[in-house]
Image (spheres, coloured by chain):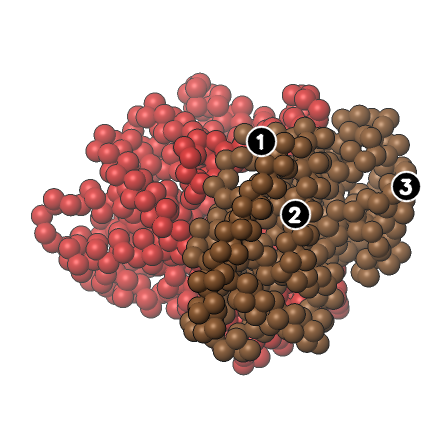
Amino acid sequence: MGKFSKFLTVATLAAAVSVAGMATGVAIAQDYPDKPVTIVVPFPPGGSTDLLARQIADKISGPLGQPVVVENRGGAGGTVGANYVAQSTPDGYTLLMGVTGSNAISGILRDDLPYDAATDFAPVSIVVSSPLVLAVNADSDLETVEDVVAFAEANPGAFTHGSPGVGTSMHMTGEMFALESGTSLLHIPYQGSAAALQDLLGGNLVAMFGDILVLSEHFESGALRPIAVTSLERHFMLPDVPTIAESGLDGFEAVSWQGVFAPTGTPQEILDRLYAEISTAMEAEEMQAFFEDRGFLVEGRSPSDSQAFVVDQIEMWSGVVDAAGIVVE
Amino acid sequence: MTDFLANLALGVDRAFSPDALLFCFIGVSVGTLIGVLPGLGPLAAISLALPLTYYLDPTVALIMLAGIFYGTQYGGSTASILLNLPGSATAAVTCLDGYPMAQQGQAQLALFITAINSFVGASFAILLVMGFAPVIAQFALRFSAAEYFSVMLLGLIAASTLSLGSPVKGLAMVIVGLALGLVGTDVNTGMFRYTFGFFELADGLSLVAVAMGLFGVAEILSNIGKPVGKAVDVGRINLKSMLPTRAQWRQLAMPTARGSVVGSFVGALPGTGPGIAAFMAYALEKKLARDPSRFGKGAIEGISAPEAANNAAVQAAFIPTLSLGIPGDAVVALLLGAMLIHGITPGPNLITSQPDLFWGLIISFWVGNVMLLFLNIPLIGLWVRLLQIPYHLLYPAVLLLICIGVYSSNNNVFDIYIVLIFGVVGFLMRKFHYPAAPLLLGFILGPLLEEHFRRALLLSQGNPLVFFERPISAVFLVVCMVFLASAFLPRIKLFRKQPQ
């Protein structure tokens, strides 16, 4: 709890500083933008965050009247790119396409990050969220959440679940599941989710909390079986698959999210302007189709709502990290 | 069978449409160029080209991006042979014998062999993709952590044969490479190891930066102080100087075949890549050679096997990608991303749900490889003339290119410092006759060995016998032991040489 109260103090301070900064920011905000805006994607090109950023950049550059450029700065699970934006001038010209890992979990897990996810960013908008799906190999006897819990109870330490690495949302969702069901799962970290999927398909892993879009192909081919999804409501791509919450673990919810962040101190007018353009862009039919094709749930939260949401998420994951006793130097 | 022919016809139809041909040509040309330029690799090139393909038809976009990928493998060896500067990290092996050949005035021959063998290796792997992709992908699924560990161990043991001269120095360099591979985030705990507070080291040292430093910058540094002049006398450039003699063709046949097989096998395993394939093929040839001492001094087997292997690996990497949705390496992962951008989810259903895309792409591989062959052979004369540019003009340009290339892979200035540091390290290593190739292999394999070893133990709940209990893993371990035994017991080796 100490960590969280310390965070609250810092958050209040940061809010005060940003209010003070606004007075001087007004003049700048009126001309915004008068040069190209950069959205930093903290991953290599080609991933889902990159895709989303490029879609948004494409749609808002017209209304903003300036080119919006996507720049990939991958590394260390998104924290290298996030750090770059955190240290940038808060003038609205350098933005981050942040995710659950870079803007919530990483900061909880490690205290050697050069930035503070809670206080160094002013969210523009949490754009989308995506639940995960708990999947097993089709040869497995496990069919329901009850089966999974029973198996994990009967075989402590033998229930393996793969993830793309320590501190990823797939890892943390597994920890949360273990915590809420009172079982112990053995986490097997991989370098990337494809390697974990390979072992799941090969029958070397018991389960995986995976990406719905990617795993759907394997549900269809019959190689894998979905057990349950991690959102409160069923997912439109897998309407027949129950949620974990409705299968006995009341209120279970773990979703990963993606959104646009500015460095703390960015004038409120600029945040509002960007949010207005993003939410208009999100209503376009093409964007709606894009979200649907990729299994994204539309969030489109306002700056203040996003801030509250991120604070909430950090608190939630802090609870899981503390209770599960995960320590990273 | 009729299905197969119908699919083939569909693929030919797609791949020979004017737009597909045009973008295939653009892709392979860009790939060759990127490959030739030291430091610029396929990862950077495809990253840059990816957003440009948003407005193309998905199949055409993939044909172009894939063309860049395999095109770089053709170009990558050019600078290795001519200047001892690998054009891409995977072409480092080609320096070992390619550069000595160039110094002996056989640059044209070496480049010709490279082009032909690249084509043969690629063709072999494409045949596998066409005929057996789903079967091979299923076989690849039987490889889990224990199997990967045993394969990597075999690669590491083979590495001990890479060095010329003192075996102790070679072994020492393998260990230095393994140690350098420890830098970065520990996969199991997420801890930063040996990063010394440099956040940029969280993903480890960049392979491109280390390879370019050790081979490229070190080569440039060791030429400083030499008398001003040109590299070597290239002699007359004509078809006769390029073509291998009849005896050489015979000498090439088996290494090329073995290289293609090794490359296809390694390439089809997700998470390995063409670099490891080339190293393994080279080590195998050296092991099988009647006179291993010729290697490192311009043996044509020393370029033919790794060149066949890395091109086969690149094409075989499409097997797990297209039939399982699991990318073979970072570059193919990028291609997978490109498919997602175009609304295609690669997976087990791709071949049946998008036959025009799958077969169009495969047929375009043939088209692209034929284009590369006809593009690269006439270019040999041009590339060889590069050697006539005086060093004091050529090297600054190359150094600049290396820096740009290394920077472009992650948009990170830190990597430029790494390349320069490793340039100095590589220079000192040369001065004291420590070989760079074993270091590079140790560096590539070290993290993989550790990761798979620990994961195998995690999955088996700490049972070390897992490596022997799983049959495929056990087979590789037995091969490892044979390798070791033949190295330490020369009598056995002599005995094996004369089976009659």
Which SS class for mark 3?
loop
Picture colour for chain A: brown
Q: Mark 2 or 3, which is nearer the eye?
A: 2
Badge 1 crowding class, 10 Å Cα cut-off, few under 14, some 14 to 19, many 20 or more, is: some
Q: B193 or A258: which is nearer to us?
A: A258
Q: Residue B485 vs residue A167: left or right?
A: left
The picture places residue B271, in percent across and down from the top left corner, at 57, 44
Picture colour for chain B: red
Q: Mark 1 or 2, which is nearer the eye?
A: 2
Q: Is residue B113 above or below residue A101?
A: below
The picture places residue A11, in percent across and down from the top left corner, at 58, 46
* Residue that badge 2 annotates: A311
Q: Residue B394 vs residue A133: left or right?
A: left
The picture places residue A215, in percent across and down from the top left corner, at 74, 52
Label 1 marks a residue whose chain is A
Instruction: Tell me the kind of residue under disc 3.
Output: Gly
Instruction: Give the residue displayed 68% in from the left and 46% down from the top.
Output: A313
Badge 3 crowding class, 10 Å Cα cut-off, few under 14, some 14 to 19, many 20 or more, is: few
Q: B251 or A232: which is nearer to us?
A: A232
